[in-house]
Image (cartoon, grey):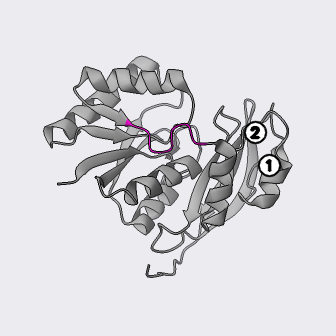
Amino acid sequence: MKEKVVLAWSGGKDSAMALRALLNNSRYDVVSLLTTVCEQYGRISHHGVRVELLRQQASALGIKLHEVNLPQANCSMENYEAAMEKVMLEYKDKGILTVAFGDIFLQDLREYRERNLAKVGMKAIFPIWHRDTAEIVRKFVELGFRAYLTCVDGEKLGSAFAGRPIDEDLIRDLPDGVDPCGENGEFHSFVYDGPTFRRPVDLNVGRVVLRDIRYFADLVPMEKQVTRHI
């Protein structure tokens, strides 16, 4: 029997690569994508992507989506951890004991996740852990995934990077010191098509806005979607 797994899902590139690794591993059965959403703004936490697009993305992937609504953008760690513990206990009651993450090399973050899950008798797995980040982003492009940068750190990347597609040109243009996968928070992304998708998520890149030190590209959903069989 396959091991049932919940995937912590940001909607971005690393999540997509982690999902692909899980789908290609006969040991695992991905039963749900789990995403934290800022209820105040109706957007994915930190990434700033509209919830409507998140839902279309999960539908295009054919995987159940579980939204965890956080009341405010500046939700405290205490409130965040309490909300996540409640959700994890619900999964545990259903016999689901494994949560997957798309983290690559941040050891302190990995230990934090493992520690919190251990408190409720669950475990974490990391399908793309310690893979070379330059290799990951190049493989992402080679496989045919398509994504836009939704949020960039204005102190490390200029406003012109917000809304850019992830492609060979972007990889080439990243400044020295910026991780190719944005693993240090330099940028976040939203994947709208690829080999794991049943159909693309139709969207346009809207205006770019500055919030504190971050530039956000507003991705705007289109009305019609075209189904593609895989």
Q: Which mark is residue 161?
A: 1
Residue at (63%, 42%) from the top-left corner? 132
Q: Quadrant of residue 154?
A: top right
Q: Examine the residues drawn in magenta and state their main secondary structure.
A: loop
Q: Quadrant of residue 1?
A: bottom left
Residue 126 is one of the magenta-drawn residues: yes
Rendered location of residue 8, percent (x, y): 41, 42
Residue on which the image places disc 2: 210
Residue 118 is one of the magenta-drawn residues: no
Identify which amino acid the numbered label 1 is placed on: Phe
Q: Secondary structure at mark 2?
A: strand
Rendered location of residue 17, percent (x, y): 52, 53
In the rendered image, the quadrant that contains the C terminus is bottom left
Residue at (54%, 72%) from the top-left corner? 200
Magenta span: 125-131
Q: Is residue 189 visible?
A: yes
The foreground one among 87 and 132 is 132
Q: Is residue 213 left or right of residue 68?
A: right
Rendered location of residue 162, percent (x, y): 75, 49
105 versus 230 height, above or below:
above
Q: Is residue 176 left or right of residue 12?
A: right
* Callout 1 crowding tier (Cα within 10 Å): few <14, some 14–19, many ≥20: many
Identify which amino acid the numbered label 2 is placed on: Leu
Q: Secondary structure at mark 1?
A: helix
